[in-house]
Image (cartoon, coloured by chain):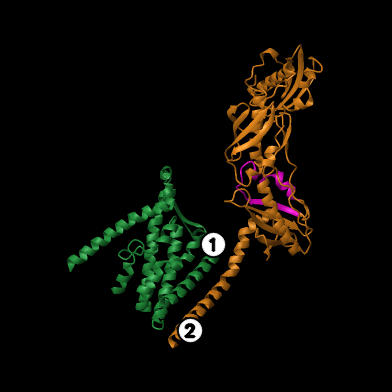
Amino acid sequence: MKKIITLTLFLAITSAVAGGILAYVNELTAPIIDGMAIEAEKENLELIFPGADFEEVAFEDETGLVKGAYLAQGQGYIYKVEVVGYNSSSPVVFMIAYDNDANNVGFAILNQQETSGFGSRIDTPEFIDTVIGTTVNDSISTLSGATVTTKAVVSGINAAKAVYAIHAGVTVDVQEPTEPEAEVLTLSSDFATDAQIVENVDGVYTISAKGYAANNTVVVTITDGIVASVEVTEFNDTPTIGDLATTDEYLSSFVGKDPSSQVDVVSSATLTSKSILAAVQLALNDANGVVAVNLGNNDFATNKAEIVSSDAGTYNVLSYGFQANNEYVIVIENGAVASVVCSTFADTVGMGDLATTDEYLGSMTGFTTESSFDVVSGATMTSNSVLAAVQAALNAEVKGE
Amino acid sequence: MNRKQNFINGFIKENPVFGLYLGLCSALAISTTIDNAIGMGLCVTLVLIFSNVIISAMRKITPSEIRIPVYIVVIATLVTCAEMLIHAFMPSLFTSLGVFISLIVVNCIILGRAEAFASKNGVVDAALDGLGMGLGYTFSLLLISVVRELLATASLTLSNPFTSDIIFQINLTSLEAYKISLFSSPAGAFLTFAAFSAVFAMIKNKSDAKEKGTK
């Protein structure tokens, strides 16, 4: 018994002495370590308030997203926030600052490795400019095509706002992110997605279409030129994100659609829904006999398109339609069509002019020599004359002919 | 003479890494650059000297039943102090060594020397043993890291841990094209370690045979 007490006492005394030494060393080094933390962050803080005096401030944050809070003397508060967007292996780190009047005066992304061209758009003025200048009570919109990343960033901003409310002693009405209106596309538009027909058995098309990560297999059934059913048989995109576009509800919304119908793109699952749209489009085009032809290679020999005059990308082109030459003014910018106007129409009124509507001519905006096109049925000759003119202008611009 | 022998033993015959195979975990993990090797080595040396001295000084009053927990408390305190001091005064070393500083606590060299030597010898001997063993460990790390840094980056850089200024730098630009990045990964550490162990074993065998011969 006595032995046990002696041993316990000895160990207790040793530990107490050790604790004392540790406390002393900690007291000695803690201020230096804290000072370095500010010093290390100073470069980032200066991004927003150059030349200010900074001081680290204590904060409480339920969400755990806010990693640091700093007071810039007389100017406002800066928060360092870390959120996980789409790329779970590398968080998005950003600084956000509110001045003393609750206005956002700074937003800078320090680190992001989101998908290039999609989530990475948070680091472009497209997103940054929607944040700077807002007040704490404003809602911030997400970006379509980058919904997952922007939602995460907005939730981080909201966490920072909640902390700011305590620091500045104001009440903040934290708003959920507003989603942009669902993108609505016509089934005949260009989805810029690779899709290929694997099999076609009596109008039941098996199509492999590229989504976000890999190819998805979509089975589209076409009856009498319209969609009868759409089914995704193989899904290779991100679970819980891409599969928002493979719900029965979304797929059944395609039933009864024809090539001119409009369909929604599912926000947060833009790429997967476009893979499905591209598959449906391909099946419809194949069933309706529309052959997508590459504009650069197609031979419009009968139209005898001829450039009358050109001036810095603006081309006047004569192109033979059904019975006479139509004249078009085509503007090409950066190798793509900027506008097409029919300046003289000489074909049949009520027939050929189906192919010179603003809508049809407008659909050519953005065309390059690689684009494929639709021919307007009932106005084949006239629409060929438009296409021939566009082709001639593009070739002249690109090849310098 | 005996003291000198003890001290020198730590380098070749009883080299903790290549001779006794102690402390391999951290030795292999941090020996990517000579900066890390020297920083880690000196840190271990200091902790080892202090722990040996303290344990040796306490050896008469420490009850033998609880000596291991007492050693652990002493070592852990020293390592934590070292960690805080490095964090405060050598931030760049702190970032590059990371968790391996706190892992010095479980480095078997330290507990091993405390149990095998310091608890049975006087303070001065214990301090010398700590210095010898610590420098032996530093020497081993330096050997591995020179080979690894040279092969992996075709250059050697030594910088001042207090200010991060570069003290000297050798660039073997002619070997730039023959870099082997494998050597910056753990596999390279094992290869280097195995080669050095073989050399040390050879030296040890030779000197053992000589001693037998003279007897």
* Coordinates of residue B24 in the picture (x, y in percent): 39, 61
The chain to which mark 1 is attached is B
Q: Is residue A215 above or below residue A306?
A: below
Tell me what hue chain A is rendered in. orange
Magenta stretch contains residue A125: yes
Residue A368 seen anywhere in this rendered image of the structure: no
Magenta residue span? A104-132
What's the mark number on residue B91?
1
What's the mark number on residue A9?
2
Farthest top residue in view: A323
Q: Secondary structure at mark 1?
A: helix
Circle 1 packing at 10 Å, graded few (<14), some (14-19), many (20+), is some
Q: Is residue A209 above or below residue A372?
A: below
Q: Quadrant of the N terminus of chain B?
A: bottom left
The chain to which mark 2 is attached is A
Circle 2 packing at 10 Å, graded few (<14), some (14-19), many (20+), is few
* Coordinates of residue A193 in the picture (x, y in percent): 63, 33
Q: Nearer the viewer, residue B105 or B213?
A: B105
* Coordinates of residue B17 in the picture (x, y in percent): 36, 62
Q: Are marks 1 and 2 on the same chain?
A: no
Q: Nearer the viewer, residue B160 or A207?
A: A207
Residue A29 seen anywhere in this rendered image of the structure: yes
What's the mark number on residue A90?
none
Q: Secondary structure at mark 2?
A: helix
Q: Identify the chain drawn in green.
A: B
Name which residue type carries label 2.
Leu
Magenta stretch contains residue A41: no
Residue found 64% across the figure and 29% down from its top: A283
* Coordinates of residue A90 in the picture (x, y in percent): 58, 51
